[in-house]
Structure formats: C-alpha cells, structure tokens
Image (cartoon, rainbow, N blue to C red):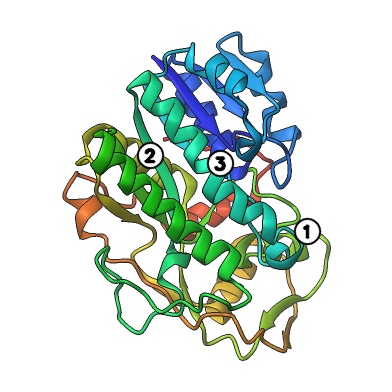
C-alpha cells in the first residue's frame, strides 16, 4: 500500500512512518522542518520504500500536487502543522496557513487519489472546557482572539474544511482529536510537560511547575495513539470525529513525582508563575474510539520508562 504522511519529521509522523514501513508499506513523507527535525528521518531514509519531499504543505503548487498525486496513495495521514506554546506568536501565521491552505492542498491530493485521509486535529479545539469529559459533539470554550487562537482556531477551521470535502465531494475523510501524547522522538524544544520534565531531568535541573501543579492532564503513549489513528482511518466511519488520548487524569505535580521515581534521578521541584492562557484540565470521552476496539495498552509508568531510554521507534 502507498501511504502519504505530512509532518513526517515530527514526533508523531516519524514514529508512524517507522511503523508503516515495518508493515511493508511504501511511505512518502513531507515536512519543511519548521518544528520537525531532520534527525527524525535519518533512519527512515535508509529504507528504500521511503521517499521524502522537503515541502511546505501551505505552499504546494499545482506541479507539486500533481507529483504527489501521481503516487496514487491509498492512505493519507495529515499531521503537518507547527506546534508548541512558545511558537504561538512567532509561528502564528504559519499555523494559520498550514491549517487553511495546507489542509486544502492535501485534501485536493486525497480527492485526486480517491484515498482515505485522516487529519490530526487537537484537544485544543475544546479550548478551556467547561464540560468533563469532552465528547466529540462538545463545541468547546475557545477565545477566537486569545493567545492560543492561531492553533485553536486553526484546527477548528481545518476540521471545517475536512467536513466540507466529505459532505460536498464524498471524500473518505475522518478527524482525530489528539490529546496529550508522549514517547520517543519528542522535540528537545517541545515545552509540553513530559518532554520539558525529561529535558530538565537529563540536564540535572529542577523540574519547573507552572502554578501550584494542581492542573490536570491525561497522557497517551505514542504507540497507543498510532493504533488509534490507523483504526480510525481503516475502520472508522466517514466524516466522523474521534478523540484519542489518556483515560486517567493526573496533576502536573503528581506527574513530576512519578517521573522522578521512574527515572531514579533525584530532582528538586520549582514552582513558577503560570501563564494566564494555560487551561486547567482536559479529559477526553473515549467511547467512540473504544467502540472500534481501541484501548490504552501502555500505562503511564511503563510509557515514561520507555521514553526515558535512548530514542527508539515506538513499537505497537
């Protein structure tokens, strides 16, 4: 099978490419390295069934789209979008363009190939939720002009584009809203809590917690996310939205203590001011993806232990 992965040099994309190549598929990857890393595809390029294009999905011209469409993909995983809280201002334009022009360009390729396609949206579409857990039909609590709006509103617009292509052109499209995910090949520049804590541990620095640490998160190991993505694409219903994430909430303070215990590295904990835009909690309702047979296989303790090892692709 021929598969296209956009954002292939990112954390999720490179792990997914590894697995699909291991399944024997022919994989084409796209990335412009704006937040992805060339190091993440070094191992992939050694595989003769992997092709890579240094493309910005928002800037694809008609020749680029034809070149990609000529592969006649059966599956497309659209992951490409700049991410990261520190980039909400510096890469705000790129986020919005990736979620508009970029999404439309990849949808056009999917339409030309008549392929199945899935977009990785985000729990950010729920904003700072008032309803727990968040079901896929919850419309969220988002500030359209807040600091997080380039990513939150970008993802909401991307979802609207996908649904339009499904309804108007009968495109075989699905959406997955990804909640907090961690594992091998996370960016060293990623300021989300797990990679930030691991970087601080490896550097012998105190773990910094924003606020008092009572804010809650759920955590999903990368292999569980990948299984969910493939399950939603291959067995999910056209035009549907699926949450994928961890099922149990943990305070950030408890996460820090757990990580110190798993790593065996003594570390102090420092409390720093909390950004005003930081949400207090999100927790996915996972009943829709569970109805397809999905469940978490990797516990948080096991996943953190795997992530602390030397970088390696996550196996399913």
Answer with left or right where residue 240 lies relative to residue 84.
left
Circle 3 crowding by C-alpha within 10 Å: few under 14, some 14–19, many from 20:
many
Q: Residue at x 67, y 14 (%)?
A: 46
Q: Nearer the viewer, residue 262 or 97?
A: 97
Q: Residue at x 27, y 66 (%)?
A: 285
The picture places residue 91, in percent across and down from the top left corner, at 72, 58
The quarter holding residue 59 reads top right
Instruction: Kindly indicate whether the residue at mark 1 contacts the one at mark 3 (C-beta within 8 angstroms).
Output: no
Q: Of the numbered discs in the image, which one, if any, rests on residue 118?
A: 2
Which type of secondary structure does the marked residue at label 1 adopt? Answer: helix
Circle 1 crowding by C-alpha within 10 Å: few under 14, some 14–19, many from 20:
few
The quarter holding residue 117 reads top left
Q: Residue at x 57, y 77 (%)?
A: 145
Q: Of the numbered discs in the image, which one, if any, rests on residue 102?
A: 3
Instruction: Please report whichever mark, 3 or 2, sits nearer to the chain's N-terminal start.
Output: 3
Answer with left or right where residue 202 lies relative to residue 110.
right
- Whether residue 231 appears in this view of the structure is no
- Whether residue 267 appears in this view of the structure is yes
Q: Nearer the viewer, residue 58 or 303?
A: 58
Answer with left or right where residue 306 lies relative to residue 220.
right
Locate the N terminus and report the quarter of the image it occupies. Answer: top left
The picture places residue 302, in percent across and down from the top left corner, at 48, 54
| Residue 72 to residue 172: above or below | above
Which type of secondary structure does the marked residue at label 2 adopt? Answer: strand
Which type of secondary structure does the marked residue at label 3 adopt? Answer: helix
Q: Nearer the viewer, mark 3 or mark 1?
A: 3
Circle 2 crowding by C-alpha within 10 Å: few under 14, some 14–19, many from 20:
many
Q: Nearer the viewer, residue 272 or 168?
A: 168
Q: Nearer the viewer, mark 2 or mark 1?
A: 2
The picture places residue 78, in percent across and down from the top left corner, at 48, 38
Instruction: Please report whichever mark, 2 or 1, sits nearer to the chain's N-terminal start.
Output: 2
Q: Which residue is mark 1?
A: 202
């Amino acid at each position: 099978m021929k598969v296209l992965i956009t954002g292939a040099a990112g954390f999720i994309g490179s792990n997914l490419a590894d697995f699909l190549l291991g399944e024997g598929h022919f994989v084409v990857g796209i990335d412009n390295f704006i937040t992805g890393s060339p190091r993440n595809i070094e191992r992939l390029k050694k595989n003769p069934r992997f092709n890579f294009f240094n493309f910005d999905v928002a800037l694809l011209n008609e020749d680029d789209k034809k070149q990609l469409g000529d592969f006649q993909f059966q599956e497309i995983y659209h992951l490409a979008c700049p991410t990261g809280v520190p980039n909400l201002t510096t890469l705000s334009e790129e986020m919005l363009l990736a979620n508009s022009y970029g999404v439309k360009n990849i949808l056009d390729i999917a339409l030309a190939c008549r392929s199945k396609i899935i977009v990785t949206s985000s729990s950010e579409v729920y904003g700072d939720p008032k309803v727990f857990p968040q079901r896929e039909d919850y419309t969220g609590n988002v500030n359209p002009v807040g600091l997080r709006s380039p990513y939150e509103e970008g993802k909401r617009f991307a979802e609207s584009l996908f649904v339009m292509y499904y309804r108007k052109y009968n495109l075989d499209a699905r959406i997955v809203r990804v909640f907090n995910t961690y594992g091998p090949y996370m960016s060293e520049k990623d300021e989300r809590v797990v990679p930030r804590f691991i970087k601080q541990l490896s550097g012998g620095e105190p773990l910094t917690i924003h606020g008092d640490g009572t804010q809650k998160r759920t955590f999903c190991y990368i292999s569980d996310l990948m299984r969910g993505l493939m399950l939603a694409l291959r067995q999910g219903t056209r035009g549907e939205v699926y949450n994928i994430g961890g099922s149990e909430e943990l305070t950030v303070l408890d996460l820090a203590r757990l990580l110190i215990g798993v790593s065996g590295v003594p570390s102090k904990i420092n409390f720093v001011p909390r950004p005003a835009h930081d949400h207090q909690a999100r927790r996915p309702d996972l009943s829709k993806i569970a109805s397809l047979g999905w469940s978490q296989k990797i516990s948080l303790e096991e996943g953190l232990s795997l992530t602390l090892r030397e970088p390696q692709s996550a196996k399913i």
